[in-house]
Amino acid sequence: MALLRRINWILLTLLTLIVCTILYKRVHRPQQRSSHTGPVPATVPRDVRDEVSEVEGVIPVAICAAQERVGATMATINSVRRNTDASLFFYIITLQDAVQHVKDYIENSALKDIKYKIVEFNPMTLKGKVRPDSTRPELLHPLNFVRFYLPLLVNRHKRVIYLDDDVIVQGDIQDLYQTRLEPGHAAAFASDCELPSTHEMVRSIGMQTTYMGFLDYRKQEVRDLGINPNDCSFNPGVFVADVEEWRRQKITKQLEKWMQQNFRDNLYSSAMAGGVATPPMLIVFYRKYTALQPLWHVRHLGWSPNTHYPEKFLEEAHLLHWNGRFKPWDYPSVHRELWQKWYIPDPTGKFLLVRPNR
């Protein structure tokens, strides 16, 4: 009898040790490494296609899709896929209210064969970092800040291309993806001083091309940065990011630091060029980025409804960007025909083009 009790005691002890070991492993399992210490700003719906891992030859492209601009996003995606033979994977980043619209648009149109993942961005990530401003409320849309969190949203790739939704790609996206970044650079942007053929047009419409147009140099905190106000700015609406270098330099934390400081001290406002989403990028990447080939970001097409680029120049451009208030799906706007050739009508009927009455 004593022997039986001893055997039972040994078995109970072993069972207890096994349960404790399992619980310990669950509680202390390794966490995914990330330079961002706050909440991960995305949730992924369970009913979307599986994400691809890093695969040689696959080009990941990140693009946002706001509810009111889903048709614009689809035109950008269509232009990318129609001008390359490369294998593509699209990360379509949106808010909760547009998830189903995006999915229905793709699955019931000519885009149904693309490889993609819908990623839902959590606006609460921006709490305490973005100051309300009624001057240009569209510049405060949560998706304008998605680019700050790119490595957290697209975390299985060493490199990724980010595109704004008011972009049309006319060249082969492989050429952009293969941009050689200089050592220590986490991203490649297009300098605002690298398009000589557009300088006259830019001056005529008052487009800002230097840091003076984005930062308030009346503030001591800005002057203390030591940034020359006459240095050329860059446009963060199109860029190639080295995800690993971005994490190593903790770029997201640096960007959040400047968002929080602006929230407290109002160092720049949406009344200035680029709103509040561009200045943190300009500060963090000051003299620390690789310059893109100029024809990979021909921009300012949305800055004025009255100024046109030379047709030959537009034909040679690899990428067109309607940054500014006047979008090609709206009216008035310029060079609408170059955008509309890639537009796919919304099968749900929610997104409609605005055109003049005839």
Image (cartoon, helix red, strand yellow):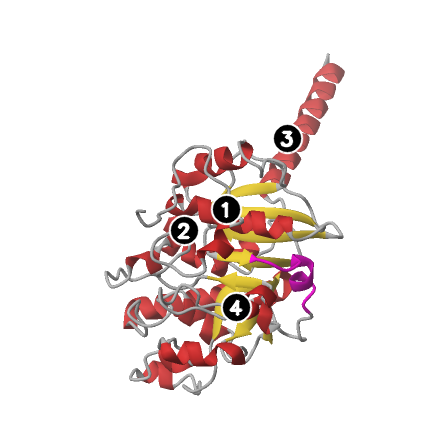
Query: In the image, is residue 60 part of the stretch drawn in magenta?
Result: no
Question: Residue 159: image x %, image y %?
Answer: 65, 59
Helix, strand or loop status at disc 1:
loop
Disc assigned to residue 298: 4
Helix, strand or loop status at disc 4:
loop
Upstream in sequence: badge 2 or badge 4: 4
Where on the picture, by quarter, is residue 328?
Answer: bottom left
Q: What amino acid is labelled 1 in the image?
A: Tyr
Question: Residue 109: image x %, image y %?
Answer: 54, 35
Query: In the image, is residue 173 part of the stretch drawn in magenta?
Result: yes
User: Marks 4/1: CA distance?
Assistant: 19 Å
Relative to the observer, which residue lies in front, 315 or 243? Answer: 315
Label 4: how many Cα within 10 Å (few below 14, some 14–19, many 20+): many
Q: What amino acid is labelled 4 in the image?
A: Val
Question: Residue 16: image x %, image y %?
Answer: 64, 29
Quarter of the image with the N terminus is: top right
Helix, strand or loop status at disc 3:
helix
Relative to the observer, which residue lies in front, 75 or 163? Answer: 75
Which residue is painted at 74% across and 49% down in the image? 55
User: Marks 3/4: CA distance?
Assistant: 62 Å
Label 3: how many Cα within 10 Å (few below 14, some 14–19, many 20+): few
